[in-house]
Image (spheres, rainbow, N blue to C red):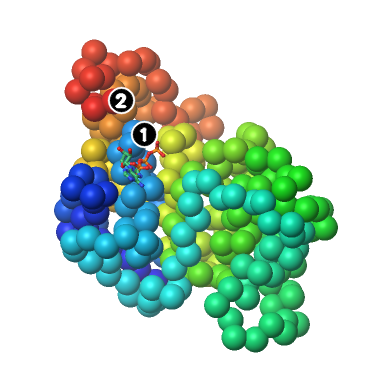
């Protein structure tokens, strides 16, 4: 069983503290976990800290995996290299490897990830010619081609159309189920979170204010605290929980919006 827990994690840029005392229960692999919070709450910074790209206090506890099994997909990934999609995924697969030869198994894993994330038809296209949504899909394939056990993705659906959002979130969910990986996604669409993520971590001004079962975490009170928005969570006619936005709460400024 792959698991991740944060213990008193802190991170700062210079003298400015961004993440303080971030602590979570064990987050278990095999399903999707959402990281939610307002703009500038510190989601990307928390990911960078967990990924070891910046130092700070506290510790990241891993079970069934180590830091080498972790892949972090940042929010913006430049794709200016004169490579085809296929070549770029191979490069991601071979990053850090000592040899350059590709085994039949490695070729199969490139093929698999291109199909699973719906970009096989783009295999021979040059990266700089891709649209924003196509680039985001390629970036996801590059991140997962090595089948990492711990995956952190910063807003992986932000450039995708409605159909592709469904398709990619379902493919990510299947990835988590099939591999048992811990997959944490920073997401802004709370209906996506309710539909796809079993667990949610909520961040407000650099502090984790709730972590656990998604439907228990995403209460109207918590949503007001995070975003300064009044909302209701109701079951739609098909029985799925939906968040309905009523509008800005009168205490919106207290939520720390900038
Ligand atoms: N490289 C940096 N140097 C200094 N400050 C930074 C740096 N990166 C981010 N910050 C600051 O840290 C705070 C948290 O930023 P971060 O990008 O982690 O937030 P976020 O929750 O991911 O936001 P968003 O939802 O807008 O992507 C912000 O106030 C931001 O200005």
Mark 2 vs 1: CB contact within 8 A? yes
Give the image location of residue 94, x and y in percent. Answer: 63, 75
- Locate residue 39: give its quadrant: top left
In screen coordinates, is 138 left or right of 15? Answer: right
Looking at the image, residue 22 sits to the left or right of residue 87; the answer is: left
Where in the figure is residue 225, as x and y percent of width and height?
A: 24, 29
Above or below: residue 58 compared with residue 104 = above
- Residue sitting at 62 percent across and 38 percent down? 160
Q: Quick check: is the Cβ at mark 1 less than 8 Å away from ligand 1?
A: yes
- Hey, which quadrant is residue 66 in on the image? bottom left
Q: Which residue is denoted by mark 2 in the rendering? A: 258
The CB of the residue at mark 2 lies under 8 Å from ligand 1: yes
List the residue tagged with mark 1.
Answer: 39
Name the side, left or right, on which 90 lies relative to 223. right
Residue 246, position in %: x, y?
37, 16
Can you say whether 253 is above or below 133 in the image? above
């Amino acid at each position: 069983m792959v698991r991740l827990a944060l213990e008193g994690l802190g991170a700062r840029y210079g003298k400015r503290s961004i993440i303080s005392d971030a602590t979570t229960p064990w987050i278990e692999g095999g399903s999707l976990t959402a990281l939610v919070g307002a703009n500038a709450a510190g989601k990307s910074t928390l990911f960078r800290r967990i990924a070891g790209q910046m130092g700070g206090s506290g510790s990241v506890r891993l079970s069934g995996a180590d830091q080498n099994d972790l892949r972090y997909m940042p929010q913006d990934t430049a794709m200016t290299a004169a490579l085809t999609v296929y070549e770029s995924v191979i490069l991601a697969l071979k990053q850090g490897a000592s040899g350059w030869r590709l085994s039949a198994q490695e070729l199969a894993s490139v093929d698999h990830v291109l199909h699973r994330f719906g970009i096989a038809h783009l295999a021979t296209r040059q990266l700089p010619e891709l649209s924003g949504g196509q680039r985001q899909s390629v970036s996801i394939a590059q991140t997962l081609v090595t089948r990492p056990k711990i995956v952190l993705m910063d807003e992986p659906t932000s450039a995708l159309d409605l159909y592709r959002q469904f398709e990619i979130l379902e493919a990510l969910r299947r990835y988590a189920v099939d591999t048992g990986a811990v997959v944490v996604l920073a997401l802004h669409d709370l209906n996506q979170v309710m539909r796809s993520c079993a667990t949610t971590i909520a961040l407000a001004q650099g502090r984790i204010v709730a972590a656990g079962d998604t439907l228990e975490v995403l209460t109207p009170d918590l949503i007001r605290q995070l975003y300064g928005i009044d909302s209701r969570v109701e079951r739609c006619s098909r029985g799925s929980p939906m968040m309905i936005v009523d509008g800005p709460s009168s205490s919106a400024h207290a939520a720390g919006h900038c």
